[in-house]
Image (cartoon, rainbow, N blue to C red):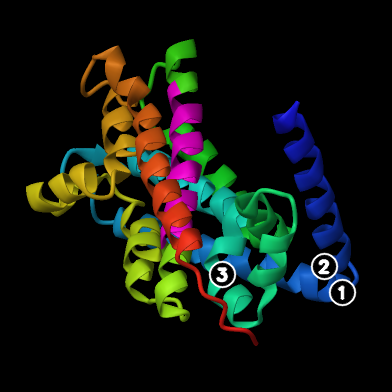
Amino acid sequence: MKIRKNLKLYMKYASVCTKSIMQYKLSFLLMIIGRFIIAFCELIGIRFLFSDLTQIKGYTYGEVLLCFSVIQMSFTFAELFGNGFKVFSGIVRKGEFDRMMLRPCSLILQVMGSRFEVGRTGPLLTAVITLVLGIRHSQITWSAAKVWTMAAMITGGTLLFIGLFILEASMCFFSIEDTSLMNVLTYGAKTHGKYPIDIYGKGILRFCTYIIPYTLIQYYPLQFLLGKKGSIYLAFSPFGIAVFLLICSCLWQYGVKNYKSCGS
């Protein structure tokens, strides 16, 4: 019952934000087009790279496109649903978070619902185009298990990036201003995640497994998807993101307990 109530409330938040954005239709359209072009340029960059190469450390053009589409979709959905955490420092500075704490509703739900921006979905079209091209150019024999794996990678990736946004927001309880350090883990992962993690070396692979678990939604399930490793257990690795999300949630709760209002 509580989940249904929270979901209904979130849909109201999303509806209000969408109506507000659509008051400026030209601005909305230009944002969609602009973000689409930026994402599409990244796709063009990959195409130019493979104009002289057939493989990058054993990965073909189609396989890299599949990898890129997963990260692009994940980041786009995370921005759509978790953008409130990305701009959380502004919410704290303006005193908006003080009002949120007075309401009998989940703080996480309120922050997520406060910045539902459909204008950030522009890169989603690029991700769909990339996914189609990746499927077309790869040699994958698709099955129900592999389709499920692809869906799990995108879902897990969305939760991973939302967790990173929550982690960034949690730092604002102590520093007020957001820190660009987290951009290395969010935008950096989005940029470097367009290629399989193992091409950067074993050190980066270990970091992205034991510190910030990008590999759980990218490298390991990708090995099963591409048939490089046949273990079906790799398809379940995105479930490990639940542990990371729990840690981020605990840090958020700790920050809330130690929060001191800074006013506006």
Residue annotated with mark 2: 21
Secondary structure at badge 1 equals loop
Proximity of marks 1 and 2: CB atoms separated by less than 8 Å:
yes
Residue receiving disc 1: 24
Amino acid at pointer 3:
Phe
Query: For residue 157: magenta?
Result: yes
Compute the Cα span from label 1 to label 2. 6 Å
Q: Quadrant of residue 33?
A: bottom right
Magenta residues span: 149-167
Q: Nearer the viewer, residue 227 or 211?
A: 211
Q: Which residue is mark 3?
A: 88
For label 2, the crowd category at 10 Å Cα-Cα, with few meaning under 14, some 14 to 19 and many 20 or more, is: some
Q: Is residue 122 left or right of residue 256?
A: right
Distance (Cα) linking label 3 and label 1? 24 Å
State which quadrant residue 157 falls in: top left
Q: Of tags 3 and 2, which is closer to the observer?
A: 3
